[in-house]
């Protein structure tokens, strides 16, 4: 019930049907394939021409959520990958704080540039927080298309009803605007199908699957059960998943560059704060440290680096030297495979 299939690509990076870990090990041992990691998943790249290129219809079910969301890659024969991702949040509050601090600076008796045109106003009228939420889903979908030969996306459609107020109905809620943008971009990757919430529920109950009410629990029954049901509606096949092991993903979020901290320090001085680089190293870069092993780079203080656990994000040290860190690759999110006991 918990076999994790290995994504396979050919020499031109074109995705092929996934394989079992045992077959992948034989390919690696014989030199037919080379290993690599992408987005936290173990993958193999064939060094020879594949014996066959037949592809089964493969669907990706997407269950959006406000705190967590589920994505499942499945065909009629197997369930290849179950993902529970943290939703992108905090952008709205960050934009408000940014505007508040800019207005505060304009009130001080210090030299400053003249106010410019409002560049935050988008011609597509997509608020920053809405764009960030749906862009995060699109990033995950694009990543899956790089590793699997996706035939169709099936998304649980969410509705926002008009209120009969002119100002509200003009943009018809950021939810509807963001959803329409997402469907348009997702359709460039593969055909898109949508299912309403009650349709997903009816199909789930017909299959005899149960969903937990604990939305933030790291279990397959929280969000991936609906995502699997959506994928099943497109490809059919097994009426029960053969793999319920969960991969948890959380985006790496940094403090954007600020001219100064929000509150002055002793003496009235305000230090610069935020950014995406630490001592010349891009934040989120996976590095190898002689003491802490494989970790990723966080912030910097007093000429030293903060190093974090790549699975949990827990800070391991604040006093690492940049010269002792050997860069490996840049990470965009944290990936954590739950143990077998949690998948049962």
Image (cartoon, grey):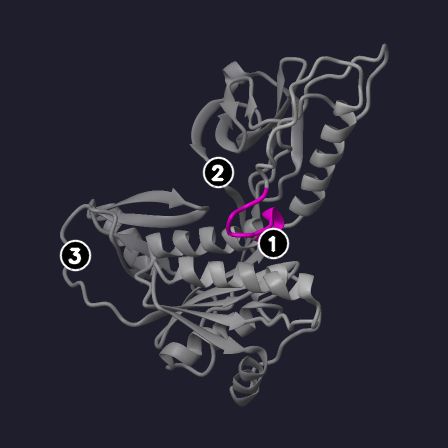
Give the mark nearer the N terminus: 1 vs 3: 3
Q: Which residues are magenta?
A: 121-130
What's the CA distance linking mark 1 and mark 3?
Answer: 36 Å
Residue pointed to by mark 1: 86
Q: Is residue 156 above or below residue 245?
A: below
Given residues 187 and 114, the one toward you in this image is 114
Residue designated by label 2: 331
Does residue 22 sit above or below 159 in this rendering?
A: above
What label does residue 30 carry, if any? none
Q: Nearer the viewer, residue 12 or 49?
A: 12
* Residue at horizontal 24 percent and vertical 67 percent from the top: 55
Q: Nearer the viewer, residue 206 or 170?
A: 170
Element at label 2: loop
In primary-sequence order, the first of circles 2 and 1 is 1
**Magenta segment: does it hold 41?**
no
Which of pointers 1 and 3 indicates the residue nearer the eye? 1
How far apart marks 3 and 2 lie (CA) works out to 30 Å
- Residue 329 image offset from top left, x and y in percent: 42, 33
Is 118 placed above or below 183 here? above
Residue 172 visible in the current orientation: yes
The quarter holding residue 22 reads bottom left
Q: Secondary structure at mark 1?
A: strand
User: Residue beneath label 3, please?
Assistant: 50
Residue name at image x 40 percent, y 51 percent: 143
Measured as percent of width and height from the top left, residue 273 is found at 68, 23
Q: Residues within 10 Å of mark 2 (few under 14, many from 20)?
A: many
Q: Marks 2 and 1, Cα distance to the nearest angstrom?
A: 16 Å
């Amino acid at each position: 019930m918990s076999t994790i299939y290995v994504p396979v690509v050919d020499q031109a990076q074109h995705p092929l049907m996934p394989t079992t870990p045992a077959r992948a090990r034989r390919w690696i041992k014989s030199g037919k394939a080379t290993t690599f990691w992408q987005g936290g998943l173990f993958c193999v790249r064939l060094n020879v021409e594949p014996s066959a290129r037949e592809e089964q219809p493969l669907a990706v079910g997407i269950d959006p959520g406000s705190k967590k969301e589920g994505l499942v890659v499945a065909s009629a024969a197997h369930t290849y990958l179950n993902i529970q991702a943290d939703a992108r949040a905090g952008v709205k509050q960050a934009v408000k704080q940014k505007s508040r601090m800019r207005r505060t600076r304009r009130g001080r008796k210090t030299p400053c540039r003249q106010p410019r045109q409002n560049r935050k106003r988008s011609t597509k009228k997509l608020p920053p927080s809405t764009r960030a939420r749906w862009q995060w889903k699109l990033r995950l979908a694009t990543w899956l298309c790089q590793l699997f030969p996706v035939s169709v996306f099936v998304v649980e459609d969410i509705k926002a009803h008009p209120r009969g107020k002119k100002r509200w109905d003009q943009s018809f809620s950021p939810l509807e605007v963001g959803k329409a943008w997402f469907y348009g971009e997702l359709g460039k990757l593969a055909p898109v199908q949508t299912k309403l919430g009650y349709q997903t529920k009816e199909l789930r109950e017909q299959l005899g699957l149960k969903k937990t009410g604990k939305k933030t629990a790291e279990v397959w029954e929280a969000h991936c059960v609906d995502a699997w049901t959506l994928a099943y509606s497109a490809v059919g096949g097994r009426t029960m998943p053969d793999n319920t092991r969960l991969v948890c993903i959380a985006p790496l979020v940094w403090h954007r560059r600020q001219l100064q901290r929000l509150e002055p320090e002793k003496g009235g001085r305000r230090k610069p704060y935020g950014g995406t680089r630490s001592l010349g190293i891009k934040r989120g870069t996976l590095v190898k440290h002689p003491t802490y092993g494989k970790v990723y780079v966080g912030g910097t203080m007093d000429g030293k680096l903060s190093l974090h656990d790549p699975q949990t994000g827990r800070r391991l040290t604040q006093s690492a030297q940049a010269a002792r860190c050997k860069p490996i690759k840049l990470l965009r999110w944290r990936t954590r495979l739950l143990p077998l006991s949690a998948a049962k």
